[in-house]
Amino acid sequence: MEQRRQMGLAATLSVVTGESIALGIFLTPAAMARSLGSPLLLAAVWCGMGLITLCGALCYSELAINYPLTGGEYVYLRQGYGTRLAFLYGWMSAAVMDPGLAAALAVGAAPYVLSLFGLPPRTQIVIPALILSGLALLNYIGTRLSRRVMTTANLLKIAVLVCLVLWVWISGHATATNLLPLTTRRPGSEPLFAAIAGATISAFFSFGGWWEAGKIAGEVRNPRRNMPLAFTGGVVLVTAVYLLVSASFLMVVPLEKIVSNTAFIAQFGEALFGTIGGKVLSACVLLSVLGGLMALTMAAPRVYYAMAKDGAFFAPFGKLHPRFGTPASGILLQTGLALFVLSFGAFNRILSFIIFSALCFLALSVTTLFRMPQPVRQWWFPTAPIVFLLGCAVIDLMILLHDPIPALIGLVIVLCGEPVRRLFFSKADVNANPLPHQITS
């Protein structure tokens, strides 16, 4: 049984925006503004990351057009470099990045669930597991149902954020003088390099996930048209939203009054909506997190499916559910690992090692554009991949200088995938079949 192309432009666009706009936009602007100490520097970091991401999106749209298959980076690396590197990406995705991000987002959502519904604190320990299990069930039951829920949630949260920005202006709470002076750094700001490094890592985390749409390319209708529109349109939309939301935050709560992320959310909500402000902002945060988790839970199991179809992963993961037509085994694997990661307690320590490893594979995926049988003939080539590769190199260097231990631990875990490949999948030869598991239309 093969997957069908059921997803249109709106659903694909919602994967790009849904993965990017999650918990980060409500937490990172406060920390970024406080460390940078200048509204202009904050805007520059957002725009710089938006430019790097847009270049990456252009590259990924070309890859998705040439390889419109389920699997994303796994497919691109397999075509460009063969079995070994593709397997290491799949190993990193399955063992580190996907369950770690899912667990971190679920834990991040828990306090806002408590605030919104007034639940006792003791229930916070079970809320992340319930969120992950519920979303896994939706994706297990069927792509069509999960696609509708994901599309609705992600388009709704865009609308909510836009309305939030409009309300800032309409209600009269916005004060442009709070942004002044634009260039002068406030007292107490971090040293410039450390501030830019930390803000850049936070910005990447907030943008992170835009590439997930490539993993579902095998289920997208008319990928030659819809994939480029989803990638580039989604990144432009996310950049605009982040700039508007960050500016609105600072126009309501002056930079000098920012103490912490959680206090900032409370200050902003109370300023806009009075005593119920905390609940209103909690609902906004929760909607954003659930949309991002939904997109991740839908996209990630498609990598395991693609690997298993190649013989580079355990065979049950290459079979679709006979009734629902979903990669059910992959969904159960990702959810099970995410539930296991919940037992670790704190997840902020793994952020650097997730980002470092992800950037390495994102950059390698883009380099496959230079190894394609047919030369790329696009107006942006080779400028876009060069800018993206330089951006990835700079961010990884910042991570190594800013917080090297988690990054190196993540790299070691990824390299541990090689003995696993040799032990279980050394006979897999994905290069012998360059375009496997073609999706039926």
Image: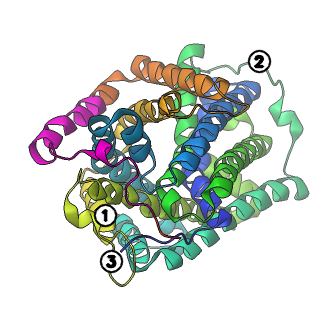
Q: Secondary structure under badge 3?
A: loop
Q: Nearer the viewer, residue 69 or 133?
A: 69
Quarter occupied by residue 204: top right
Q: Is residue 187 visible?
A: yes
Q: Is residue 289 magenta?
A: no
Give left or right: position of 179 versus 71. right
For the residue marked with disc 2, what is the amino acid? Answer: Thr
The location of residue 371, given as percent across then percent down, is 47, 29
Residue span colored magenta: 409-438
The image's colour scheme reads rainbow
Question: In the displayed structure, would residue 236 be above or below residue 302?
Answer: above
Q: How many marks?
A: 3
Q: Which residue is mark 2?
A: 184
Whether pointer 2 and pointer 3 mark residues with C-beta atoms closer than 8 Å, the reply is no
Q: Nearer the viewer, residue 409 or 174?
A: 409
Query: What's the residue at 31%, 42% (across, down)?
Result: 431
Disc 1/disc 3 C-alpha distance (Å) = 11 Å
For the residue marked with disc 3, what is the amino acid? Answer: His
Give left or right: position of 297 versus 202. left
Q: Which residue is mark 1?
A: 330
The location of residue 242, given as percent across then percent down, is 70, 44
**Dot label at residue 321:** 3
Structural crowding at the residue carrying mark 2, measured as other residues with C-alpha within 10 Å and reported as few (<14), some (14–19) or many (≥20): few
The location of residue 169, given as percent across then percent down, is 88, 53
